[in-house]
């Protein structure tokens, strides 16, 4: 805690005391608070109004039971969450995660990050997050439908296009969003497309939403490279994961001239030194819902590494796009040793504090998730705009808007880091830039 201002360290210790056992939330709060000492010097009104203490306490935390029945008639009970963290800039906005690891600490860490990420987009959206410890993996479509309907039966009462607008996250794609939207419509008797984002294109969804997080993260890294008079051209890249974020990160890397040679799933890593066959990955993951090891069945030259560590493969650009804390200090040292020059986080908080320190010490261009992966929620906000206007934009127009948003986020983070005496420190730039906008709104709204 030595990097913290003394007053702010006291605030962190109180957050730690009031939220026992929520390690991911503690980590997310610490990473932001370590950057805010100079902000309180420049803006003493934030300390007077206890903005930091208030921003660390969610406006509302909802926990509920989700009973559902499997195809054999057996009853299961899961736990549902929605943390409506901060609505100073607009309605709560953030995804729903369905994964066995989900508990309150995970949802609060994601929701806390979402406040600043959403602020950085420049869009009028607040921060929230939700989900369940339900695992859709291995479940039939009917089982997933029954779970989603039960989940939404409780959650619907807390949602609304001017109140709280969820989207997808890990384990929640177009299928799950469709089932939840159908149940919301059934219960409320309202066709309110702006209440969920990530919808199907034929019923209110936005083009580019599927690609947005991956494309946006790649645009952000491209801007970091440009700032160093470099580019993706000819760079060897690694992308962890093989979901939406990873797939469309790989796609944009290839479009910008890079070569992605490895990706992964929870069972292992596929390494193809010739460059990944993206069409095959899309077929395996998006159509057939198979494991990444099946890539090697089609491409015999590729190597599948069961339970492998993707960060041991030499690269110049690394883009963690799977889950939190997947790059530790040892992994970061390996990446630096093997010639990595840039890291862009497609996932939320995928690098541990030790790993971040390694990257910053080595002067790696390091883009934290709250800045680099903000393209997903930004395009969700664009989807909300289209829904509000009963409109539908074409792919090129929407992608151009996404690219400009990511360019603006990079510029704001870059300039803020310089203003506060840490040029090139995107962690500090993102945290301060995101925080100040929210803090000013909270001051303006009074003590609420």
Image: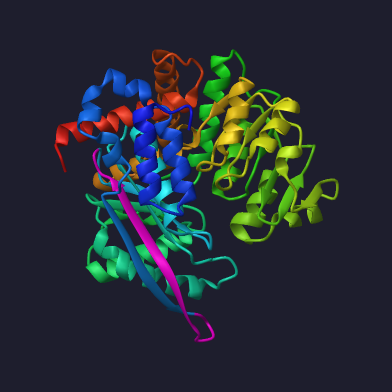
Label the magenta part by its dominant secondary structure: strand
Residue 221 lies in quadrant: top right
Figure check: 435 above or below 25 = above
Q: Position of residue 34 (x, y in %)?
A: 43, 30
Q: Position of residue 353 (x, y in %)?
A: 55, 36
Is 86 included in the stretch rendered in magenta? yes
Which residue shows up at 39% across the image and 36% down it?
Answer: 117
Q: Would residue 31 appear left or right of 302 to someone viewing this image?
A: left
- The foreground one among 177 and 90 is 90
**Which residue is farthest left?**
446
Bounds of the magenta span?
Answer: 70-88
Which residue shows up at 33% across the image and 31% down it?
Answer: 435
Figure check: 7 above or below 243 = above
Figure check: 433 above or below 98 = above
Residue 356 lies in quadrant: top right
Q: Is residue 168 visible?
A: no
- The foreground one among 243 and 5 is 5
Q: Would residue 298 appear left or right of 136 to someone viewing this image?
A: right
Indicate the quadrant containing the C terminus: top left, top right, bottom left or bottom right: top left
Q: Position of residue 165 (x, y in %)?
A: 31, 51
Q: Is residue 433 visible?
A: yes
Q: Position of residue 170 (x, y in %)?
A: 51, 54
Is 84 included in the stretch rendered in magenta? yes
Q: Would residue 254 appear left or right of 156 to someone viewing this image?
A: right
């Amino acid at each position: 805690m030595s990097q913290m201002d003394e007053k702010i360290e006291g605030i962190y210790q109180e957050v730690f005391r009031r939220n026992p056992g929520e390690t991911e939330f503690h980590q997310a709060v610490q990473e932001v608070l370590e950057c805010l000492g100079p902000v309180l010097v420049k803006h003493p009104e934030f300390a007077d109004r206890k903005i930091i203490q208030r921003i660390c306490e969610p406006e509302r935390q909802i926990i509920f039971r989700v009973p559902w029945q499997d195809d054999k008639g057996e009853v299961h009970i899961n736990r549902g969450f929605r943390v409506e963290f901060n609505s100073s800039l607009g309605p709560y906005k953030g995804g729903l995660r369905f994964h066995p690891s989900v508990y309150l600490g995970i949802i609060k860490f994601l929701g806390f990050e979402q406040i600043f990420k959403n602020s950085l987009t420049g869009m009028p959206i607040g921060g929230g997050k939700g989900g369940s410890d339900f695992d859709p993996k291995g479940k039939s479509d009917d089982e997933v439908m029954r779970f989603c309907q039960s989940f939404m039966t409780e959650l619907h009462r807390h949602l609304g296009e001017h109140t709280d607008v969820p989207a997808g996250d890990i384990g929640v794609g177009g299928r799950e969003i469709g089932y939840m939207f159908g149940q919301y419509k059934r219960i409320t008797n309202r066709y309110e497309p702006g209440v969920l984002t990530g919808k199907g294109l034929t019923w209110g969804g936005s083009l580019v939403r599927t690609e947005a997080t991956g494309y946006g993260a790649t645009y952000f890294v491209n801007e970091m490279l440009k700032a160093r008079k470099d580019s993706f051209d000819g760079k060897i890249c690694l992308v962890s994961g093989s979901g939406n974020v990873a797939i469309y990160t790989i796609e944009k890397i290839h479009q910008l001239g890079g070569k992605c040679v490895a990706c992964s799933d929870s069972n292992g890593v596929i390494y193809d030194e010739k460059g990944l066959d993206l069409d095959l990955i899309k077929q395996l993951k998006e159509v057939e819902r198979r494991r990444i090891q099946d890539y090697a069945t089609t491409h015999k030259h590729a190597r599948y590494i069961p339970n492998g560590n993707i960060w041991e493969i030499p690269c110049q650009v690394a883009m963690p796009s799977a889950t939190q804390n997947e790059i530790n200090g040892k992994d970061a040292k390996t990446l630096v040793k093997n010639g990595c020059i840039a890291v862009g986080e497609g996932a939320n908080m995928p690098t541990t504090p030790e790993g971040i320190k390694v990257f910053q010490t080595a002067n790696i261009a390091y883009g934290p998730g709250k800045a680099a992966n903000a393209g997903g929620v930004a395009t969700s906000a664009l989807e909300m705009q289209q829904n509000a206007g009963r409109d539908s934009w074409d792919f090129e127009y929407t992608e151009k808007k996404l690219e400009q948003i990511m360019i603006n986020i990079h510029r704001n983070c870059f300039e803020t880091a310089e203003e506060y005496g840490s040029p090139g420190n995107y962690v500090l730039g993102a945290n301060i830039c995101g925080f100040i906008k929210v803090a000013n709104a909270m001051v303006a709204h009074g003590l609420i």
